Every structure is written in structure tokens, then in C-alpha cells.
Amino acid sequence: MNAVQEFKLSGIALPKDAGGMLTEICEHFIEHADVSRTEEEALLTSKLGSATIRIRERKLVIELSCPSEQALQMSRTSIAEHLFYFAGDDPLELTWAEPETRTGLDNIHHVAVVSIEDVTPNMRRVKFACADVSPFIGGDMHIRLLVPPKGRKPVWPGLRDDGRVAWPDGEDELLVRVYTIRAVDIERRELWIDFLQHPAPGVVTPGADFARDAQPGEKVALLGPGGGALPAARSMLLAGDESALPAIARIAAEAPEGTRIQAIIEIENEQEEQPLPSAGSLDIRWLHRRSYPAGARDILVEETKRAIASMADDTFVWFACEKEDVRSVRSFLKSRGHDKKNRYVAWYWERQVD
Ligand SMILES: Cc1cc2nc3c(=O)[nH]c(=O)nc-3n(C[C@H](O)[C@H](O)[C@H](O)COP(=O)(O)OP(=O)(O)OC[C@H]3O[C@@H](n4cnc5c(N)ncnc54)[C@H](O)[C@@H]3O)c2cc1C
């Protein structure tokens, strides 16, 4: 029998508060990995491999163990990015036993706009030519869209010695937004992204505006894919608003025959409905925001909770929309003891509070 080859790397982080940092890491990764925690130690396990993080004299000692060199480097970048994100403005030192040797990011894809079309009045589809679509087939659906400033030669991100992404800044700063790969056209080597044109009077919406103004030939980059794995379950509840509609449509499109899907999708009005082909059996309820009683806000959340309460316990629950709504559904699932392995609950955008 072949031994499983493991690639290992250790590192040491010195944050302001090692215990607090470990807690933040565990709370964040619980939605993306298996997390087990004791007072002094955490073990995070995902398909990239495992990370053991121990508190030792105010430091965090990190041990990464992965099935491939690429997974190891991606884990290093992920841990480094999150540590610095959680540190915020507090000082943080991070060193690894072996320095970063990659010259650039492995998962950056340079793509060009092929065509643009309106799927519905508020949903604009941009198709991108991509030399190698194979990383996007099956698996994770999410990417980061990187748009360089108009009229400048693009400067793409590199890597810092500590494994973090080195983003270009100043005049070369990129527009970065997270989107879902709505479809992969293997024959044409194209990737589709559906952009909600979310009407926010007086508010700048650079991601939506990129799709509004996109021109064939325009060059951008996609970082990923990472996160948002296509669920493999016989019975699923898929719920969300328009920002989640591309993901819901993709999950339905890729579900095999025999899958039972219940979908609850909140949209502006009936003009925003779109066909969602699936080999599975699909029962969709469209909620039209325009027809809600004045002041009503929680209808998607309440309808989703009602559906959860009436479904079998082993149904996979997939829910994405605004941050506070997601928190509410996540707490509801926790209060019901819904198995974490049977859910994906993530916020896709955040309502600005004036
Ligand atoms: C994992 C993931 C996958 C996503 N996939 C998609 C996708 O496939 N298609 C898609 O359209 N979006 C998707 N989103 C959501 C998208 O990233 C956000 O809506 C993003 O804020 C859009 O950027 P923007 O520059 O247009 O607006 P921003 O500059 O980010 O925000 C401007 C203003 O618009 C408001 N706003 C942002 N999004 C919405 C919204 N959906 N509805 C109402 N108001 C909003 C903000 O509160 C803010 O006030 C995804 C998000 C995540 C995290």
C-alpha cells in the first residue's frame, strides 16, 4: 500500500492576544472546516489538509500538514491572510520555517470578456474566455474578480514572504469583489458570472458597474476557485436573495437526477424570475419584494425558518443573502441542533447602516 505523502510546514505567530486570536480563528473556520478546540490548542481540518495551532508562551505555534505542495502553499496563504485580518491594526509577527518560494499566485486566472447579456432586467451575465477551465469544474463555485484601473497596464497581485497576498496599491489598486461561477462552458472554454445590478440610489456599486459597462475583449483576472462547494445531497433546501441566485441556479443545474430540491428565492418582482433547469426535482417559491407589506423585511428569513422546521433533519440547508439575515438563520439552525455537515450558511453582502 502506498503511504499518503504529506507536505508539512511550521510557523510561529506573535499576536497581541494569542488566546483571543485562536478563538477568532476557530469561530471563523467553523463554517469552512472541521474545528476542534481545547483551551490551548485547535485542530482545523479541511480538504486542503490540517492546521494545528497551539498557544505557547504568548505565541501561536502553527503546524500545517497537506496532501500536496500546492495545498500546503494555499494553506499558508489562507492562515497568513486570516491572522493579519483578525489582528486588524494590532501588531502581528509571522514567520515560517521555510520562506515563501512561489513567485506568484497559483490560482490566478487571466480572462477576457467575451459577451454580455441581460438575463433579466436586474441580472447581467458576463461570459469570460479562460484558457483552462478545468479548475472550475465541480468543486468550489466562488472566485474573487480582480478588475484593474481603466487605462493602466494591469499589475496583478504577488506574494509576500509571510505567505500573504501582496496587493498592488495606489494608482494600480484593483477592484476586488467576490462572485460565483454561474456556469462552466467546457467546450467554448468560457466561465459565466451573473452580476446583480442592485439599485442603490446615490451609492457607488463598482462590482455591479463593471458588468454594466463591460466590453468584449476587456481583460480581468479571477482568483480561485475557493469556497462554496457544490453540495452533494439527495435532498436540499436552497434559499437566498438575488446575490445567491447564481449559486442556487448552478447547484440546481449540476444536481444529479433523483435530487429533491426546494428553493426559496427573494427577488424584486416577477420580471426577475428565471428558468432554473435541473435534472433533479425542483420546487421553487419566488418571493417578490415589491409585493411585501410596507416595512416588511424578514420575509425570506421567516419563510426559510418555516421550511427548515418542516423538513427532514438530514436535508442539506444552503442559505446565502445579507449578513444579519444569515446570522438569524444560522442561530436558528444551531438552536435546532442541525448537523453542521448538512449546511452551508454564508453572507454574500452587508447592508450599510447610516
Ligand atoms: C461568496 C460570495 C458569492 C457571491 N456571488 C455573487 C454573484 O454571483 N452575483 C452577485 O451579483 N453577487 C454575488 N455576491 C455578492 C456581491 O459580492 C456583493 O453584492 C458586492 O457587494 C457587490 O459589489 P458592488 O461593488 O456592486 O457593491 P458594494 O460597493 O460592495 O456595495 C455598495 C452598496 O450596495 C449595497 N449592496 C451590496 N450588495 C447588495 C445586494 N445584493 N443587494 C442590495 N444591496 C447591496 C451595499 O450594502 C452598499 O451599500 C457574492 C458574495 C459572496 C461573498
Image (cartoon, helix red, strand yellow):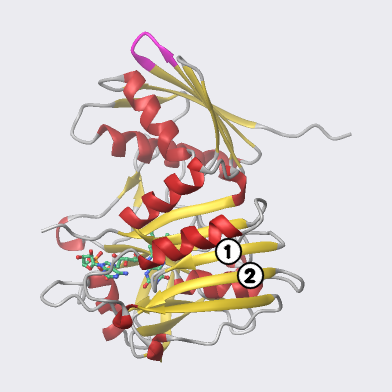
Crowding around mark 1 (Cα neighbors within 10 Å: few <14, some 14 to 19, many 20+) is many
Between residues 349 and 227, which one lies in front from this camera angle? Answer: 349
Crowding around mark 2 (Cα neighbors within 10 Å: few <14, some 14 to 19, many 20+) is many
Residue at position x 34%, y 19% in the image: 18
Residue type for callout 1? Leu
Residue at position x 36%, y 8% in the image: 57
Residue type for callout 2? Ile
Q: Decide if residue 37 is in sight here.
A: yes
Which quadrant of the figure has residue 47?
top right
Mark 1 and mark 2 in contact (Cβ < 8 Å)? Answer: yes
In the image, 243: left or right of 51? left
Residue at position x 56%, y 51% in the image: 343
In the image, 233: left or right of 55? right
Quadrant containing the N terminus in the rendered view = top right
Residue 248 drawn above or below residue 18: below
Q: Which residue is identified by label 1? A: 237
Between residues 38 and 9, which one lies in front from this camera angle? Answer: 38
In the image, 278: left or right of 12? right
The spot of residue 342 in percent (x, y) is 61, 50
Q: Secondary structure at mark 1?
A: strand
Q: Which residue is identified by label 2? A: 261
* Numbered circles on residues, count: 2
Residue at position x 46%, y 73% in the image: 265
The spot of residue 144 in percent (x, y) is 39, 61
Is the C-beta of the residue carrying label 1 under 8 Å from the nearest atom of ligand 1?
A: no
Span colored in magenta: 55-59
CA distance for labels 2 and 1:
6 Å
Q: Decide if residue 229 is in sight here.
A: no
The spot of residue 168 in percent (x, y) is 25, 55
Q: Main secondary structure of the magenta part?
A: strand
The spot of residue 87 in percent (x, y) is 26, 32
**Of the image marks 2 and 1, the number of the one nearer the N terminus:** 1
